[in-house]
Image: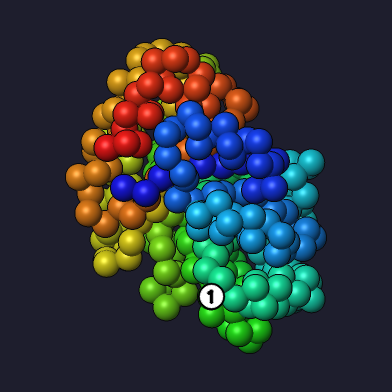
Amino acid sequence: MPIGTTIPWGPLDTSALASRTAGWGATPSYLLWYTGFGEPADPAKLAAVRAAGAVPVITWEPWNYTRGPVQPEYAMDRVVAGDHDTYIREFARTLAADGGPVQLRFAHEMNGDWYPWAARVNGNDAADYVAAWKHVHGLFAEQGATNVTWVWSPNVVYPGATPLADLYPGDAFVDVVGVDGYNWGTSQSWSSWYTGSEIFAPTLDEVRALAPGKPILVAETASTELGGDKAAWITELFAYLAAQPDVVGLIWFDENKETDWRVDSSPSSAAAFREAAAG
């Protein structure tokens, strides 16, 4: 199964990429980074990813990351109304001119409540989200960006999440279903330890029913060390996903953020990941 990684400061951070490649004993198949609205598409980043032998995965976020989930200028009805069309068209033209394959994860984790594009946040509802997705998709088609693979990427389902069926734009507008899921363990007051299969299986079943035949990418995943055996968690996750024929890859969120998600958070975690990656 192809595996990938996030790069904390983007794909031009060659030292970060080199350390991951050395630690894994393998070259990542995907490199994922985050771009907020207003930031241009960067051909140098695309070139750097391809030079490293990986597929670029851009997580494209309609917000100002320094602020919270209430940002009226980035509400989905403002996207549909065309407030950001000039910027979106320029982004699409840049990717089209680049010409190489790129996976675009627009407005991910929309079934949660922590981003300003999410349903039931910032004045949005599910229909607004679907309309915004279709609007952006249409602008890319206008600019001839046929090299873009559209990755619709919800968070794993949880009690209180917006139903995925209400948020799915339709098969004509989605190429790959991405799924984000984390093992928070006891790192948070509200969280508990779950295996990888426990985290992903219900959502994989749901998206298979919703979008039959679409390839599935685990677009973000990782585990904390707190509350269980991270090395065993990695081994179980890889074994579970390897048994899912429609799962085409896994991208590890290799960052020390809310907790230490990194592969090398401990020697045992790093060794388990290296062995799983080799397999």
Left or right: 107 in relation to 279: right
Q: Give coordinates of residue 83: x percent, y percent.
A: 78, 72
Q: How many marks?
A: 1
Residue at the location (56% across, 22% down)?
259
**Considering only vertical position in the picture, is 146 above or below 270?**
below
Left or right: 236 in relation to 67: left
Q: Nearer the viewer, residue 278 or 1?
A: 278
Q: Nearer the viewer, residue 27 or 219?
A: 27
Q: Is residue 92 visible?
A: no
Residue under label 1, please give it: 147
Would you identify the image quadrant in which residue 272 lies? top left
Residue at the location (50% across, 32% down)?
22
Q: Give coordinates of residue 216: x percent, y percent.
A: 35, 56
Residue at the location (32% across, 29% down)?
275
**Considering only vertical position in the picture, is 8 above or below 192?**
below
Would you identify the image quadrant in which residue 193 lies? top left
Disc 1, SS: loop
Q: Is residue 143 visible?
A: yes
Q: Give coordinates of residue 248: x percent, y percent.
A: 33, 55
| Amino acid type at mark 1 | Asn
Left or right: 80 in relation to 31: right
